[in-house]
Image (cartoon, rainbow, N blue to C red):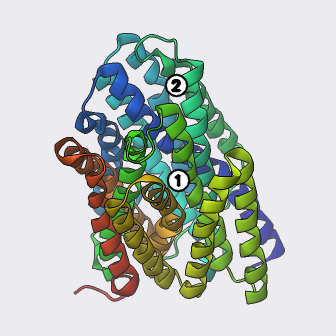
Amino acid sequence: MTNKQSSSYRTAFANLTFLFFMWGFMTALNDILIPYLRGAFDLTHTKAMLIQFAFFTSYFIGSLVYFIISVSKGDPINKIGYKKGIIIGLLISGVGALLFYPAAEFQMYGFFLSALFVMGLGFTLLQIAANPYVAILGPSKSASSRLNLAQGFNSLGTTIAPVLGGFLIFTFFKESAGSDAVKIPYLVFAGIFILMAIAITFTPLPRFTNPDEVSPGFGALKHRNLVFGMIAIFMYVGGEVSIGSMLISYLNLPEIGGFTDAEASIYVSIYWGGQMIGRFLGAVSLSNSKKWVKLLVMPLISVVAFIVLGITTSFDAALIYLVFLIINLVGFLVGNSLPNRTLYVFAGINLVFLIIALSTTGSIALWTIIAIGLFNSIMWSNIFTLAISGLGKYTSQGSSLLVMMILGGAILPLLMGVVADSYGVHISFIVPVISYLYIGFYGISGYKQNKIS
């Protein structure tokens, strides 16, 4: 790689980080919308979870349409380029955010669900284009590291969203009638998406062309690691979103914390913030850096996280979280910079946390659930890069299939809502147990490459 290429790749990567930040921000904002619209429209847990169902079903529908086009006509991204795919995705997301205004004006829950669906369609195209684009912006050996770093900025968005969104919706616009509190925030978000589309239009991004002929067909599905990876993405997104979606209701429980929605949104931020910390750690752990650099930088990141948490919340909370930060560092050491090993180690730790949370109450149950975010951190990036490894000319098609499996974020939260309504919010956390069992399998065996005959 020449110096000019390297500089071009760094510029492109820097521009994409804000993109990852924004779609992380908007996704986590759904965790605030759920309790807010549940109150505004007097919904059950199951009906409130239709917010996630509408949003994440759009990933499935959008990716399915993309896959059908790629099978019958050839891969669209390979034809139009990653840059145009990203711009179109941003514009569709902007339209979805704009639709929140008439939805609030007409006070229609179904209209809100439609707006979320449209916004999700835009994010679908962004996911299909941006994830593999980041993966190929440099050496293949460090693809997981780059994607973890980009996802770290995605997690910065998911960390800020509950705090900022909680303040705007539960406090600043609290006096607005019904669902009006979302009008101004989503108009601003729509403007940001449109401005981003304009900015990327005028930003020079490296154009990758595939030397292999991309012909119609189901070539991607012949790869075992992709097929098992699709299920792993379904389980990962389903588990992660289920926990985040039910977290405020969980923290409302007297036996857990008895917090108000505004107080609970701070803990939602810590949950998603754990992903940010873990992804930055993962970017270092899975990079090509020397071992002594990793051993120096990774504890430093954890110390900074501890200090920031202490300043923004309380020293007592930071001390409790420090225990999980240490466990996280040990997990990375055991993972030994191997994406698959780190994946199954972290899945196993989350299983233990869920079992503890299900069998206890109070601060122990609270913090073991919050800490799951820290260990979710590397899962998307590691599953994604392991699943598309070796796909060659079918990489974008494989990416669309993986994004299709974000459907897990629609199905598992809905299932969790049904369990919560039937048996209680606390016991509903048994649902993500299934997710981490499968992710553990994928890290041990499912990731291995070989063609399916």
Q: The residue under label 1 is which amino acid type?
A: Tyr
| Residue 222, quarter of the rendered image | bottom left
Q: Earlier in the sequence, mark 1 or mark 2?
A: 2
Q: Position of residue 262 (x, y in %)?
A: 52, 32
Task: Indicate the quadrant containing the N terminus: top left, top right, bottom left or bottom right.
Answer: bottom right
In this rendering, the count of numbered labels is 2
Vertical position of residue 389 compared to residue 179: above or below: below
Residue 445 is left or right of residue 167, and the answer is: left
At x 74%, y 82%, the residue is 295
How crowded is the residue under tag 1: few (<14 C-alpha within 10 Å), some, or many (20+)? many
Residue 420 occupies quadrant: top left
Q: Nearer the viewer, residue 381 or 263?
A: 263
The numbered dot on residue 170 is 2
Binning the other alpha carbons within 10 Å of mark 2 as few (below 14), some (14 to 19) or many (20 upward) gives some
Q: Is residue 422 left or right of residue 295?
A: left
Q: CA distance from mark 1 to mark 2?
A: 19 Å
Does residue 291 appear to the left or right of 72 in the view shown? Answer: right
Report x, y in % for residue 192.
Answer: 62, 33
Residue 374 at least partly seen = yes
Q: Picture coordinates of residue 107 (x, y %)? A: 35, 14
Q: Residue at x 66, y 66 (%)?
A: 280
Q: Which mark is residue 271?
A: 1
Mark 2, secondary structure of its residue? helix
